[in-house]
């Protein structure tokens, strides 16, 4: 089973981002997804920067993949998407059907990202015919869905599961972070750069409820399938996706690698794993509890 580092969901300063990916070269990860998937207004790094990072990671023995935006809202977004599709070296993760169309038109194999919302074998079969070589299960999907789809999975397609990080729950054309500061989305002052792991939302009782990351809504708790690795392996999962966090990403990858190698390295935190078990996502089920 391989480990993948998912695309950075947050908006970090340029140098912090470059330093992070410089350190990733030495981390025990097989696949690294690069690119902006949340908001096209985030311009600390451009596509050329990600291509440079991808080249360096490839030289370090990693498989680099370019991830596309989840929402295409302008002609400039479309131009950036076309450039990513036409990069001619690295595989692309398609996170909306416009990217799928461009990739399929050129006959380029791609990764079917989690926001394509693949919940049945028929949809996956269609995407496989269009060129999908790997699919990422929607984070809210669980073991029962995968078990039902497994007999009908297209031959040779890889299955990737979101295994660690704050769960992306929803996307909107409206920016929630900007709204929190009474700003318009087009004049947001890039407030999300002040929240490197998202902005926590609490209930009136003070309980952490959700995390807001620009146009993206995330879980408050960290989703963690470390204790479920034996079951994930038995279910035929090929790749585990770890979502980058501001601190501790290297330790998380090391813990997952150790578990895959038969050694237990516990992680501390307020975790959940309910979705995988067919329960409400914020619950913690089984040995991890």
Image: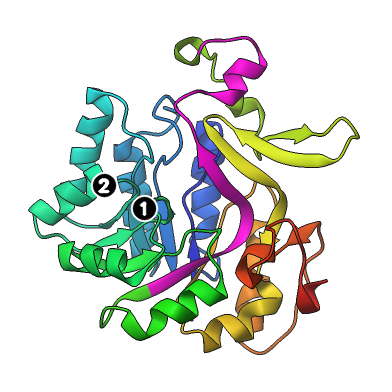
Please, what secondary structure does the residue beneath circle 2 have? helix
Question: Where is residue 172 shown, x and y percent of the image?
Answer: 48, 31
Task: Tell me the crowding category of disc 2: few under 14, some 14 to 19, or many 20 or more residues within 10 angstroms, Cα based.
Answer: some
Question: Where is residue 252 shown, x and y percent of the image?
Answer: 67, 64
Q: Quadrant of the C terminus?
A: bottom right
- 177 in magenta: yes
Question: Where is residue 170 shown, x and y percent of the image?
Answer: 53, 41
**Residue at position x 59%, y 27% in the image:** 193
For marks 1 and 2 on the same chain, the one whose residue lies earlier in the sequence: 2
Q: Quadrant of residue 164?
A: bottom right
Q: Are marks 1 and 2 in contact (CB under 8 Å)?
A: yes
- Tell me, yes or no, if residue 182 can be seen here: yes
**Residue receiving disc 1:** 116
First to last magenta residue range: 159-184
Q: Say whether residue 163 is left or right of residue 32.
A: right
Q: Which of 40 and 87 lies nearest the eye of the viewer? A: 40
User: Which residue is farthest left?
Assistant: 106
Q: Which of 278 and 232 lies nearest the eye of the viewer? A: 278
């Amino acid at each position: 089973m391989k480990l993948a580092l998912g695309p950075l969901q947050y908006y970090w300063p340029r140098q912090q981002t470059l330093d992070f990916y410089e350190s990733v070269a030495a981390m025990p990860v097989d696949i690294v997804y690069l690119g902006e998937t949340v908001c096209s207004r985030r311009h600390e790094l451009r596509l050329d920067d990600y291509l440079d990072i991808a080249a360096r990671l490839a030289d370090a023995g990693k498989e680099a993949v370019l991830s596309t935006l989840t929402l295409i809202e302008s002609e400039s977004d479309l131009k950036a998407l076309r450039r990513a599709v036409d990069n001619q070296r690295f595989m692309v993760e398609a996170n909306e059907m416009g990217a799928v169309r461009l990739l399929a038109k050129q006959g380029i194999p791609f990764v079917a990202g989690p926001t394509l919302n693949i919940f049945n074998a028929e949809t996956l079969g269609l995407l496989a015919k269009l060129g999908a070589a790997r699919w990422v299960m929607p984070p809210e999907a669980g073991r029962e869905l995968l078990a039902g789809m497994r007999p009908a999975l297209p031959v040779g397609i890889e299955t990737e599961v979101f295994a660690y990080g704050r769960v992306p729950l929803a996307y909107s054309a409206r920016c929630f972070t900007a709204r929190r500061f009474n700003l318009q989305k087009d004049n947001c002052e890039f407030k999300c750069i002040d929240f490197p792991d998202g902005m926590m939302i609490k209930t009136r009782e003070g309980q952490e409820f959700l995390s807001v990351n620009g146009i993206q809504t995330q879980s408050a708790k960290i989703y963690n399938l470390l204790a479920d690795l034996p079951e994930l392996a038995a279910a035929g999962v090929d790749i585990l996706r770890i979502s980058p966090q501001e601190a501790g990403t290297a330790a998380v990858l090391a813990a997952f690698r150790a578990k895959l190698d038969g050694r237990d390295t516990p992680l501390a935190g307020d975790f959940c794993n309910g979705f995988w078990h067919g329960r409400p996502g914020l619950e913690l089920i089984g040995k991890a509890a």
